[in-house]
Image (cartoon, rainbow, N blue to C red):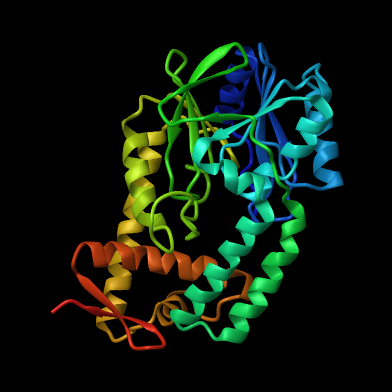
Amino acid sequence: MSEPEATPESEAALAKAAAWGVHLVAVPTPFAVGRVNCYLLEGDPLTLIDAGPKSEKSLDSLESGIEATGHKLEDIELVVATHQHIDHIGLIGTVAERSGAEVAAIDISVERLASFTFGSERDDDLAVDLMVRNGVPREIASALKEVTASFRDWGSPATVTKPVAAGSKIRMGSRDYEVFLRPGHSPSDTLFWDADRRLMFGGDHLLSHISSNPLISKPLVGEGDRTRALLDYRKSLALTKADPVELMLSGHGLPITEHANLIDKRIESQDRRTGKIFDLVGAGHSKAHEISEAIWGNIALTQAFLTLSEVIGHLDILVEEGRVTVSNDGEFDRFEVAS
């Protein structure tokens, strides 16, 4: 996946942010999404939002990016996680250890970040169960689990010393930001909002060049065996669309200056996909994996859960709307058009 090239508009947006003391620090990742956007916020406390995956290459880039702003990694006083994914949290523990910085994250994610390995294993076990129940051959599901486990070295536990609640405020770089919990891409997606500047840090909630995958995972709170990620995401997008954002700084890609229009495009795309999946169910594709293959053909191993997670998300919508029913035949979850 190629990263978007800078435009005059994106450069102007980053220059505006830099004039406010907000600096982009792009850190490489081993993943298809490309570099992760970390942000250094000058002021009291000197704040780093996200830190990139755990690797020497990423750490070198993070250090050099911070130094380009006239600071050092050891100067960081607060490091903040936008959500629980490894390309954002892998180096948080390293930054905190070297700088003595406090670590802030949404309160419901504290245990998940502290028990990174255990939490990742639970998500992997859920993924295998979900794949097998929805028609993915067990040998493929098991092989993907091994691949996913090999990625785990890019992550690392993070001890949160400053949990923040949704609706509260957090001081970053001499400004007070309101904390929004907007789950979907992950259960812990957290946005930080400066109403005076109409500036929002969005993590992976909304990306300029690609759709954010609403990935099914174990819930962080409440009941249920899994998240209804796409349903959650659409509710979150509706809330974000209503926010008067003029500049959103995201976790990947370019700054976003027309967030409402972009959200409309994402919702329209989701609606088209939901309609296509409804038609496929009506044509007799009763298992989610069959639907994935009907849409994408021969699916690469590394994409098996991503595609299945998306299909199940749309099926969740159809079930909630009463257009499709789901049952289990003792081996597989099966979907059919409601009579």
In the image shown, does 34 or 103 lie closer to the viewer?
103
Q: Is residue 125 left or right of residue 38?
A: left
x%, y% of residue 315?
33, 68
Q: Is residue 172 left or right of residue 330?
A: right
In the image shown, does 26 or 81 lie closer to the viewer?
81
Q: In which image quadrant can residue 323 be found?
A: bottom left
Up the image or down, 301 lies above or below 108; here it is: below
**What is the quadrant of the C terminus in the image?**
bottom left
x%, y% of residue 128?
55, 74
**What is the quadrant of the N terminus in the image?**
bottom right
Up the image or down, 22 lies above or below 206; here it is: above
The residue at the point 42 percent across, 80 percent down is 294
In the image shown, does 126 or 317 lie closer to the viewer?
126
Q: Is residue 283 left or right of residue 95?
A: left
The residue at the point 63 percent across, 79 percent down is 142
The residue at the point 69 percent across, 17 percent down is 46
Judge whether residue 84 can be spotted in this image: no
x%, y% of residue 118?
65, 58
Farthest residue toward the left?
A: 339
Judge whether residue 307 can be spotted in this image: yes
x%, y% of residue 289?
45, 79
In the image shown, does 67 or 167 lie closer to the viewer?
167
The residue at the point 61 percent across, 75 percent down is 300
Count of numbered badges drawn on the protein: 0
